[in-house]
Image: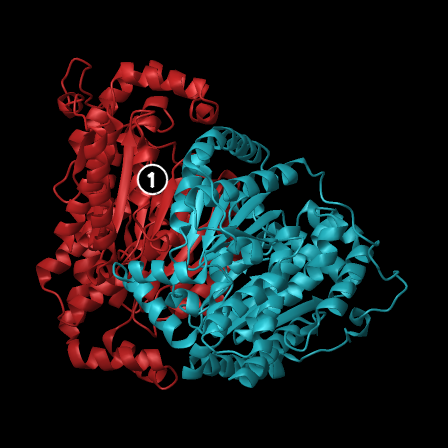
Chain colours: A red, B cyan
Amino acid sequence: MFKSAEMPQTLSKEDFKQLEPDLRTDLLKAQLQLIEEKKFSVLLVIAGMDGAGKNEAISRLHEWMDPRHLACNAYGEPTEEERLRPPFWRFWRDLPEKGEVSIVVGSWYQLPMRRHATCKCSKSEYELELVRINEFEEMLFNENVLILKFWFDLPLDEQKKRMKALAKKSRRVRHILEEWTRFMGDETARETVEEAAMRTSTAEAPWYVIPALDEEYRDIALGQIINSALRYRLERPEPESIAAPAIVAGTSHRSALDAIDLSAKLGRDEYEKELEHWQQELATLTDKKKFRDTALVAAFEGNDAAGKGGSIRRATRALDPRIYKVHPIAAPSDEEKARPYLWRFWRRIPRKGRIAIFDRSWYGRVLVERIEGYCTEADWMRAYNEINEFERQLVEDDIVVAKFWLAISEEEQLARFKAREETAYKQFKITDEDWRNRLKWGAYAVAAGDMIDRTSTSAAPWTLVSAEDKRHARVTVLKTLCKQLKKAL
Amino acid sequence: MFKSAEMPQTLSKEDFKQLEPDLRTDLLKAQLQLIEEKKFSVLLVIAGMDGAGKNEAISRLHEWMDPRHLACNAYGEPTEEERLRPPFWRFWRDLPEKGEVSIVVGSWYQLPMRRHATCKCSKSEYELELVRINEFEEMLFNENVLILKFWFDLPLDEQKKRMKALAKKSRRVRHILEEWTRFMGDETARETVEEAAMRTSTAEAPWYVIPALDEEYRDIALGQIINSALRYRLERPEPESIAAPAIVAGTSHRSALDAIDLSAKLGRDEYEKELEHWQQELATLTDKKKFRDTALVAAFEGNDAAGKGGSIRRATRALDPRIYKVHPIAAPSDEEKARPYLWRFWRRIPRKGRIAIFDRSWYGRVLVERIEGYCTEADWMRAYNEINEFERQLVEDDIVVAKFWLAISEEEQLARFKAREETAYKQFKITDEDWRNRLKWGAYAVAAGDMIDRTSTSAAPWTLVSAEDKRHARVTVLKTLCKQLKKAL
């Protein structure tokens, strides 16, 4: 992959002048079609050592394309805000909308590569990181992001020469050069890069090595690759259908939901006692100094009228309002619709020491979106894995993930719907849509069963709560939160 | 204002039970109308010492109202992300959309009040802070935010008793209590609160003192005030018209723009030399350690085709992509449209050590929005003051604000429009809208003249640049940026 890049590739100034106008026109036309159709977004990952002219090439792209729809996101050392969240958070938050192009400098490759090159992680740890990058990029690919990755390559001697020159002017480069001299034998550095290129150059997100010795050649090569990739993607028909139909359990299949004991009850006196006890426990746990090294993400799902709101309020009443936020999940905004499905949850991930409670959650993808056909079968089928990966990242970053399914019987729901219609201040809780959803009770049961099956992980387990008796449900939720927190602290 | 609050105000449990259902229904109806009409948003500032039951009252509001459209934003010590930006940034970023209600705990009053009560600022400094809060709230009022501010009050003895009890359970309260005992004579504390209430209880954003000794009384009083304020605002006709018509200079009036010497030119050789010199200077200045204590916000405005993009690229080429971001300003997103006009610029304010370049800016309010009638006369008239206040906050937070007006003649614009139509890769830069705007040359000249007059402050001056010769414009921009930065460092 790097062999041809090491050959001296050049382009004369005259050839450049001849090639540039057509390339520019083509590139711009492709971009305008992209802006017009808004079918996908583009991520251009620009990597390579300092001195290879990344900045100059980026500047050229801004000249060639419509810069109003071209953003450059460059990442250095993570900020406090970023350090207090999972590593991918900062890349998620900057993802471009459909129709937009975003250049990424200092991408998700930077930290793992640097750690490996400076001997701070083993080869197998490095490989695992690269596997996770693949999963991340695959998900973006499926969510209509075109990812092109460029490695700007220079012969080693030239690279060192250029870095030394740059180091005179820039503190940052000086620091990198020191690190480089200390750790990176030429061999390790090359191995780090080659390993990454080999393991992560996938059909979904290919790497391109750009010989960067000659700046005319470099920019034309970059422009041509972007141009042809854009064109290819613009002409590609809509996402191909899935390989196999969804394997859905029949309605006769008994799911985990059927095992919930709906007869569980709690008397008023015991309830008051338990409630106070667990609220105090929750307050104490979240006030501990150690809690500042973790965070809590709680997701509430369940049948309509199962009492999610009431359970959430019993929990938040015990909490310092400075540290928690409740996120009711309704329809996405246009900024959210234009980005991958999980983006709107990433943007709400709490920093360390904080709590985010989701009243309905990312599981909407495999519940309402599946049933109402808001996404394709392929979309919700791959969502199980994406969600598991999403939660794994949270847990790995020491965030406690608690997931509750609040269950009631069909009869109890009917009784509550009717009660809501009869009480003036509860009428807002019941709409025609609730009655329509009720007609789909069976479909929701199947979808919820599949969901529990496919997303119960040991790191982020589901808690199935009988909510037929509200008191029982509220205390169970509080108790579970406390137990999960206690285990983590 | 506090006298009546010191009287023992109580409500029996029976009276509460009788009042609650109707109040709840009314409150909810009002909220549903708010959600439906999306005409304004609501900020409920909840203040008062710990122990007065703020958290309990907030929880009650969540029970009474539709919690999916009710958020609670509570602020403690500023995070790094927040400390590196102007003080109001964190409140701006959480502003609710129209139709939504947001409860604010630990509001913009907290820090000034605490500083004053702990003798860290003089009385006049405190008064000045309160004046600025008034300006901030007035702007929100004008941007369709209903602000209600509540002070939960307790008799002093009771307050101390409750805080001591709380301190046993919470590290935070313990800390506040220590500070309180060390600094706050009862007199200073009361004076701090009274001063704030007196100076900032305006028609636009009134304070309400809630006697909080009795929790039934407390919650009913809170609910009733919110209910009647919501109702009043829902029934209020659309914003009243302005007091006086806009004072607009006639077209014969010579504005600052007429003084720009459009004949300024730069030869190619001198251009190359100067360009390199100032680019190097810019790179050096922004690489300095001291730059990390400041930030740069640059706004580019000017006639269509004046070459804003080209000038911006000549500057960014000199910069480390990790530290700058270019924000092309087009139509606002729906999340932006639902919030005060300046919100979309606040959310893009750079942290310390970073640079934000705006290709078109907040001045759109007094240019295109004024001319096309996208906002009312009252809106753009008050925008001058709001913008000055906005920039003052940036400058006060040690951010360098550079504003450029790039001017060309009507004839030069025509020539450039034609050239754009003739070059394939430039066609995207010229649209029917550009030709339509050109017909309004006179109106834009008047609006730009007014803008320069009213928003040239010594802290954030306009630089008027002749862009008839592109080379001259680019070098002038670079040179000005360097000079403003140098002065600041």
Visible residue check, residue A190 = no
Instruction: Name the amino acid, label 1.
Output: Arg
Residue B32 image offset from top left, x and y in percent: 53, 31
Residue B277 image offset from top left, x and y in percent: 53, 84
Which residue is drawn at the image coordinates 24% and 64% (left, top)? A111
Which residue is drawn at the image coordinates 17% and 70% (left, top)? A117
Q: Secondary structure at mark 1?
A: helix
Q: Which residue is mark 1?
A: A313
Q: Within the image, what quadrant is residue B264 found in?
A: bottom right
Visible residue check, residue B90 = yes
- Quadrant where the image shows the C terminus of chain A: bottom left
* Mark 1 Cα-neighbour bin, 10 Å: few <14, some 14–19, many ≥20: some
| B437 up-or-down from B24: above or below | below
Q: Nearer the viewer, residue B222 or A288?
A: B222
| A304 up-or-down from B99: above or below | above
Q: Please indicate whether residue B370 sits to the left or right of residue A232 in the image.
A: right
Q: Nearer the viewer, residue B412 or B220?
A: B220
As drawn, the residue found furthest toward the front would be B8
Residue B256 image offset from top left, x and y in percent: 79, 71
Residue A170 image offset from top left, x and y in percent: 37, 81
- Quadrant where the image shows the N terminus of chain A: bottom left
Q: Within the image, what quadrant is residue A247 found in?
A: top left
On what subunit does the disc labeled 1 rest? A
Which residue is drawn at the image coordinates 63% and 51% (left, top)? B141
Q: Please indicate whether residue B419 sits to the left or right of residue A64 in the image.
A: right
